[in-house]
Image: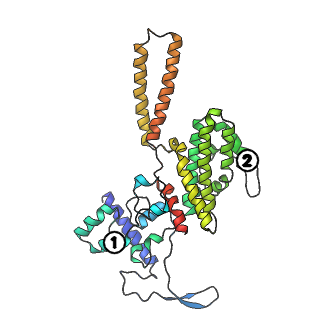
Amino acid sequence: MRLDEMKQTNRDVLNEVLRWVLHPLKFKQNLSAESGYYNVLHADGNFRRCKPDLAAWLADCPEYSDLHHLEQHGCFWFKCTKNEHGDYVPPDKQHPWWDHNLYRTLSDANTKAAEAEILPRHVHRGFNVVRNIPCMVSDLPKPDLLHTMPIGMLDHLQKWIFHFIKTHEQFDKYNVICLSVPAYYDLTPTTKSYEEVSQWNGKEMKKMSQYLIGVVTQSRQRGSPTQRPIFNRAIESTRALLEFYMYARYQSHDDAILSYMEGAMCRFDTFNDVFLLGRAGKKAPAKASALRTELFKKRKVDNETNAETRTPSRKRGKMNAWRDFISHEIDVSKELNADFKFPKIHLMSHWVEQIR
């Protein structure tokens, strides 16, 4: 069995299992079902005639994509391409919604013309359980605080800060500051440095969010004056993401809180380029390594060509200049091959709308 056939079989099995699990709901393909009302025992001991309605489905991003038959793990609310995932999109300029009614109609048609029409829409063909339940499919996904923020974006933020601090040679000081955070109220201080923790869970991330901005700020105070401007950008980016997380944790939101969330998201989008080197993907190191090899060859040619005309002091100066130049070019290469185009950072831009 080919890989694509096996994946299609897995999707069919998943949807058939969910169809049995959700059998009390009235499927559009099962017209023999009754009105959908059932006698349900309530907490007061009385039975009432009720009709179950699927209103929400909490899951992580890959599960939503599989559940909605989307080919790419991306936005499951709007038709947004992967290249646009890292861009901040204001609420009044969102992309069009996924048209699940159209996809169901095309899949049910089961003709070559329908298959040709559904193919460029980046959705899988075949029976889909949520498209055949009387509900708004695009309204089912809800903001998932745990997977999107603590073990999602905050985990990414930790790694970005780790790379940033290490790049600016402040990591030892950063660890000392982390380990010196005192206990206060419900905050339990950490007893391990960042590298000693093999995996951060949601509870640890929640605790870390209470003191992270203070640790990054103190790391700036111990840095050199030339490092402070870029540390200020790192602090602003960290503060903006943590503010968004804190507001998202509120049990209720009014228009003012939602506007604060939008503002925090906008500020994070403005300053997050300071962590761009920490987002270099798998291809970036390979390209940087090839560039480093090429520059080393040029340096060797330059040294051999001018060996007789340079004094020892000039040779040392030229070697230092080459070293700085190569380091700068490698950083530029990594930045050019790094981006923030991944699903979880994009999902944050839809939270305010979903909360409303």
- Report the front residue among 18 and 327: 327
- Report the front residue among 133 and 356: 356
**Distance between the alpha carbons at the discs numbered 2 and 1:** 55 Å
Image depth: mark 2 or mark 1 in front? 1
Residue type at the position of mark 2: Val
Residue 351, above or below 216: below
Residue type at the position of mark 1: Leu
Q: Quadrant of residue 221?
A: top right
Which residue is identified by label 1? 102
Residue 247 seen in this snapshot: yes
Q: Quadrant of residue 104?
A: bottom left
Name the residue: 45% across, 54% down: 85
Q: Which circle's residue, 2 or 1, is located before the other in the chain?
A: 1
Q: Check disc 2 and report its element: helix, strand or loop.
A: loop
Quadrant of the rendering where the N terminus is positioned: bottom left
Residue 305, above or below 161: above
Residue 109, above or below 4: below
Q: Check disc 1 and report its element: helix, strand or loop.
A: helix
Q: Position of residue 252 (x, y in %)?
A: 63, 69
Name the residue: 42% across, 76% down: 19
Which residue is identified by label 2? 181
Name the residue: 54% across, 43% down: 274
